Amino acid sequence: MLHQYPGYFHLQNVLLHGEFVESGARVMLRGGERDITVLLTGAKTAARAVEVRGQLLDVGRLEPGDLRLAGYDGVRDPERWPRPGEELLLLVTGVAEAQFATTPSVRGLALQPWRFEGQKVTIVGQFRGRNLFGDLPSAPGKSRYDFVLRSADAAVWVTDLRPRGRGFDLSVDARVDTGRWLQITGTVTQDRGLVTIVGSAVATTTAPEAPAAEEEAPSPAVPLEPAEVVFTSPYEGEVGVPVTSSVRIQFSRGLDPATIAGQVRVSYVGPAPPDAPQPASLEFLHTYDAGTRAIEIKFTQPLDRFRAIRVELLEGLKAFDGAPVKPWTLTFSAGS
């Protein structure tokens, strides 16, 4: 999943299962068919399956002089610097022997999906709606009732199953329903790095009893690095954009929907042509899709032809984890 969604996991603490292998002068963590370069920073390798905690860095999203890359032995020439998503690096903070899951659970499916893929399982987790808290980097988009099930530090998608049964009918778009615990039965699959349960039965249940906490050195807190825009349509400086187009802005992490109102501003740039009226304001509506981490802006009237339009994200917009979103500007021009 890290390689499919590097922007989502960049600068986050992650927990991985795999084996350490050597590749030339580098130490890699191999999980399934993918490897990731690691910096051990005092942690010790082990010649067995391990559970590794660390902070993920997408090297291409950092500057060559970033202090977090002090032990990085990759290319240092800024002209050959990796593109975002091309080179991932794990700053390891802890290594323990991996305990293989013998019974299915949300955590077991998330960390070792290959052990259960294709099997029918029954698991318990907390209902999180249609990824309303940004627990996962993307959505499978299989059915109108897809929802996230979370337990402790792991989450999976449930598809093809409406969260409704005797005495309950939960909305995938309402946070007020996300405190409920559900028992889900279904078949485990993987799609684009997402672990998914194709559901067949659902029932309400109670939260499982928390296991006794083990002594463990605390992992260093990840700084709340600002979230950023990773994709737009139209793109910066684009000309000839159809006057009936909408604007789509996708972010590196999920947003806190409560902070969006009032933080999006759209306006024309420069004076209107002589034959065009000068509106007092450019009216628009915006919606947020948590599954794709994207804001869509739709205009109530067609845009003025041959005008430049500026879209601004103001200070105050926040990611789901409380991190700020960098103030940002997009400028494009409408066509005929």
Image (cartoon, helix red, strand yellow):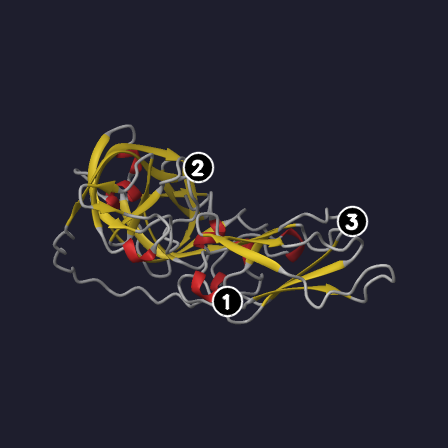
Q: Mark 2 points at which residue?
A: 192
Q: Mark 1 points at which residue?
A: 317
Q: Residues within 10 Å of mark 1 (few under 14, many from 20)?
A: many
Q: Is mark 3 on a helix, strand or loop?
A: loop
For marks 1 and 2, give the one nearer the viewer.
1
- Pinpoint residue 177: horizontal percent, then vertical percent: 28, 54
Horizontal side of 155 relative to 85 (left or right) equals left
The residue lying at 49 percent from left, 57 percent from top is 72
Q: How crowded is mark 3: few (under 14 residues within 10 Å), some or many (20 or more)?
A: some
For the residue pair 83 and 257, the one nearer the viewer reads as 257
For the residue pair 265 and 119, the one nearer the viewer reads as 265
Mark pair 1, 3: CA separation: 30 Å
For marks 2 and 3, give the one nearer the viewer.
3
N-terminal-most mark, 1 or 2 = 2
| Residue type of the residue flagged with mark 3 | Gly
Q: Is residue 317 above or below residue 335?
A: below
N-terminal-most mark, 2 or 3 = 2
- Pinpoint residue 322: horizontal percent, then vertical percent: 41, 67
For the residue pair 143 and 3, the one nearer the viewer reads as 143
Mark pair 1, 2: CA separation: 29 Å
Asked if residue 98 can be seen in this view, the reply is no
Mark pair 2, 3: CA separation: 36 Å
Horizontal side of 267 relative to 195 (left or right) equals right
- Pinpoint residue 227: horizontal percent, then vertical percent: 50, 62
Q: Is residue 231 above or below residue 224?
A: above
Q: Name the residue under label 3.
A: 335
Q: Which mark is residue 261?
A: none
